[in-house]
Image (cartoon, rainbow, N blue to C red):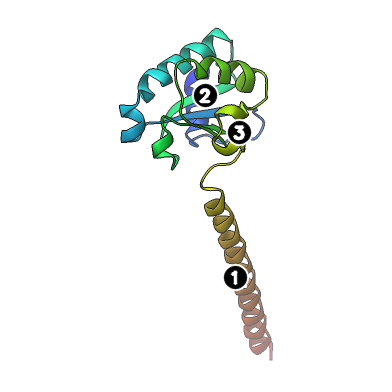
Amino acid sequence: MSAGALNQARCLGAVMDESTDLRCVAVCHASKCRRRGAEALAVQLDKEIIAHGLEGTVATRRGRCNGLCNRGPTMAVRPEGCVYARLNAEAIPRIVREHLAGGRPVHALIPNGKDSTPSEKKAKKQLKAARKAEKHARKAAKKAKKRLAAELMERVT
């Protein structure tokens, strides 16, 4: 598998590699963002990443809706969780230069100047649900262990 294909697979979540510092940039390709030029921006983004020599550390993909349809086209950068909105041809080189190469998010292009996605509340709810499920699984395992111990004691006596 080529390095580019491996990065694409990591970006899509198909390959998990904790040892990498790979950033995944997903340009929204939902209908409103596409109508506002998302495809041209995605092509420009790929060219800028190559021009800055970041193809080994930044993977791009055509993403889903970021929930900012009226502010499109949008682009999400992971793992930071920044979502850029109202993108245009001038914004892409700046984001690549300052954020992807320089490590500093471009707050002027982030809605409300924050480094958060509109789904932050959803992520917190999912985390809470996962913790609750984990707690439930621990309780179920404990009950099963007690039941097994009781069955073994009955067999012994």
What's the residue at 35%, 23% (across, down)? Answer: 37
Q: Position of residue 1 (x, y in %)?
A: 48, 21
As drawn, the label of residue 59 is 2
* Mark nearer the N terminus (2 vs 1): 2
- Are circles 3 and 1 on residues that touch, CB within 8 Å? no
Mark 1 neighbour class, 10 Å CA radius: few under 14, some 14 to 19, many 20 or more: few
Q: Nearer the viewer, residue 85 or 143?
A: 85
Separation of marks 2 and 1 at Cα, in angstroms: 37 Å
What's the residue at 41%, 32% (across, down)? Answer: 72
| Residue 64 visible to the viewer | no
Left or right of 150? Residue 121 is left
Question: Relative to residue 85, is residue 56 depicted above or below?
Answer: above
Q: Nearer the viewer, residue 62 or 56?
A: 62
Question: Relative to residue 154, is residue 14 depicted above or below?
Answer: above
* Mark 1, residue position: 136
* Mark 3, residue position: 17
What's the residue at 49%, 15% (across, down)? Answer: 90
Question: Relative to residue 39, is residue 132 depicted above or below?
Answer: below
Disc 1 marks a residue whose amino acid type is His
Q: Position of residue 140 (x, y in %)?
A: 59, 73
- Are circles 2 and 1 on residues that touch, CB within 8 Å? no
What's the residue at 63%, 78% (across, down)? Answer: 143
- Quarter of the figure with residue 68: top left
Q: Position of residue 148 (x, y in %)?
A: 63, 79
What SS does tag 3 mark?
Answer: loop
